[in-house]
Amino acid sequence: MLTNIPGYPRVGSQRALKKACENYWAGKISLERLELTARELRRENWELLKEKGIDLIPSNDFSFYDQVLDMSMTLGVIPSRFQALQASLAHPRCLELYFAMARGYQKNNFDLTALEMTKWFDTNYHYLVPEFEKTQSYHLYQPKCVEEFKEARQLGIHTKPVLVGPVTFILSGKIKDDQLTQAEVLQKLLPVYIQLLQELKRAGATWVQIDEPALVTDLGQAVKELYHTAFTVIRQAVPELKILLTTYFGGLEDNTALTVQLPVAAVHIDLVRAPQQLDEVLALLPNDKQLSLGVVDGRNIWKNDYEASLALINKAIRHLGKERVIIGTSCSLLHSPYDLDLETELNPDVKQWMAFAKQKVGEVIALSDVIEGETWLLEENRKAMESRKTSPIIHKPAVKARLKEVTEKDMQRNSPFAVRQAIQHESLRLPLFPTTTIGSFPQTKEIRQLRADLKKGIISEETYRAEIREAITDTIYRQESLGLDVLVHGEFERNDMVEYFGEQLDGFLFTQYGWVQSYGSRCVKPPVIFGDVQRPQAMTVNWSKYAQSLTDKPVKGMLTGPITILQWSFVRNDQPRMDTAFQIALAIRDEVKELEEAGITVIQVDEPALREGLPLRQSARAEYLEKAVQAFRLAVCTVDDNTQIHTHMCYAEFNDIIEHIAAMDADVITIETSRSQMEILEAFAAFKYPNETGPGVYDIHSPRVPSVAEMETLLKKAVQLLPVQNIWVNPDCGLKTRNWPETESALRNMVTAAKNLRSSYN
């Protein structure tokens, strides 16, 4: 049997790519140094996979930013606003244009906004949204895929190039002209795909992986016809290439017959997310196709249960024979940390149940070996599975008992929003278009060093707290001088909005090097939820009290919501996910109540990942959304009417969940709207969203500083869609990754824009 890895992490076990990119953007290293780092990382990955014995080793799974942006550059899908910049570059294929599309560009008389960013299906991985315009003509602009295949060949490694498939690529983008259809875009893109595949064939490729995860979503007939067209044309153009059509993140369900009949050599299915799909796929798979079984979880860190995987593999072998079965991970290992062997400080009882990317590659090989008779591997795995089921460190009877006592009343505010709004306006006395930020302020090198020094024992807890108080004091005074209306303490004590809380909750543990990429150079180190969750003591109250003591203006208490903590953690898989979410909600509820008792009258509970957890299939969404809303309300509905509850969401389409956002009943919701030019607000307007809304008026993921006029224009769009008295003014996300000069410049412009609107509408 062949073994298959759909993709591998690319930032490096010590985040070498992140550091190199950020140094390049800062002008500290050359383009050559950046590219050398990239080559070294690719070589390390290829050599590791070859050494482990993987047959289908991926290439072109590396990216400086994200694989969808790479595909846009490969196919020449470059929006018209970037074409003047492209023409001005001495080397138009260089990374300057690429990073301009990713991050925006504000120099050399150019002021270009970045491509819109959103989540890759239901993951916490972000991608840059392709833009399709009527006037675009596509051509093979940057054949990175071919170059990296040749690079691996020079190292003596034969790889399987990975491409984002044409239909998923189109569905992931936005058509910017009403007169342009998806079928027309495909017609223009297909010749470029074919040229790319032909170049790969000439370079010596035998297998090419084409990712089409859209096949696990609800598809209309028109999109299904696009699949028929695309893969028929591809097969006719390059019949010699073996195409591995790769699906993941769910089951094929009603798209099974469509998928298995497409003219490809093999189909990959995700049997971690959807093991039940195997029977139907086996029944319908034509005799000329191989089947790749994604049995090792690419999105979580728990050790594979060999017995469960072998049951699926053996069923496939009985139907197809060994020669038609391929064993692999469920999806790319991009979503997993690098190497569990680096973790020297983990609780050994929990570590024995875990596997990172490197270990998951070993599991793929081990499953193949067990099939070939190495049964001792099965017995060793069985012992680890059994020890987890019976471990006393996982289960806490008191937590389970409290969860059983939760009632519907615990999820209801005392009064409806209209009543609360009047009370809050009277008590807070904020102006029209009140200004605030989303929570975090720049995490300077000094602040990061301070936390590192505390961890290493270089400074005392007392010294650390004094320095953090000084940073909070400085930030409160900066906000007052800028004229902001509702302030924040800056979150300088927090390394990450989820990790910080997990470190203080029972049932969590943390890795040293468990980094995964979120977008671009942004990496996160998700907590591991291994057991029942509870809050042993207050987590944020003292910092919020101190900040509020410095000012007469309200200071928001800043918390992360239960669904976001769930989504951005590696979650235990031995109980329903929503049971874990409700345990987290009860812990946050305790913190909310204690913040209110400490005099904090504005409390923000962020849920940027609420939509991220939305099932890809419509039929499964109602149950998830009901539970997610209940978890949020359980966390916040312990406060009095005069306490204003905020929440924050970013990089999500809201049209199909707007009624559930309303059901959350937060007094204020702040959302990302700047990259979409306020398009997202149309859903709020159409629904007549009753509560207050803060549409983000500038993009914090770009270093450019928007003008007052630009932000005023966005606010005027908001005024056309929302009641004036319900509009807040804020950036679209936290300011943690920005520096102070650009932050203060942008916020100064933002406050001025709000005041200008205020004078007009008062």
Image (cartoon, rainbow, N blue to C red):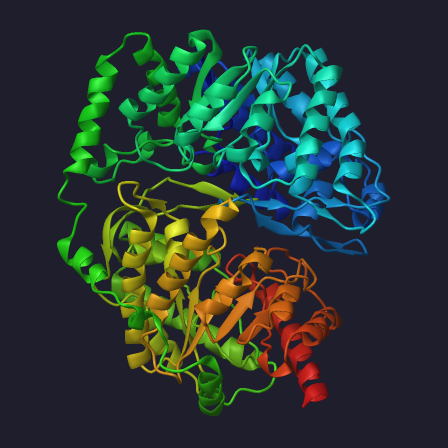
**Left-right relation of 480 to 469:** right
Position of residue 538 relative to residue 255, above or below, is below
Q: Residue 750, percent across and down?
A: 64, 73
Residue 28 visible, this angle: no
| Above or below 733: residue 276 | above
Q: Could you tell me how many numbered marks the image carries? A: 0
Which of these two is toward me, 666 or 590? 666
Direction from residue 233 to residue 472 in the image, left or right = left
Residue 575 picture quarter: top left
Q: Could you say which is closer to the camera, residue 476 or residue 276?
A: 276
Q: Residue at x 57, y 77 (%)?
A: 435
Answer above or below: position of 516 versus 552. above
Q: Residue 132 in the image: state x and y as whole percent.
A: 76, 44
658 or 111, which lies in front? 658
Q: Give the residue drawn at x 42%, y 53%.
A: 624
| Residue 159 visible in the picture | yes
Residue at screen point 33% across, 58% down: 501
Task: Look at the picture and state if 291 lies above or below 752.
Answer: above
| Quarter in which the C terminus is drawn | bottom right
Q: Is 419 on the left or on the right of 411, as rendered?
A: right
Residue 717 position in % (x across, y down): 72, 71
Quadrant housing the N terminus: top left
* Residue drawn at the location 49% of the way across and 18% of the way down: 291
Residue 178: x and y, percent?
80, 51
Give residue 327's quadrant in the image.
top left
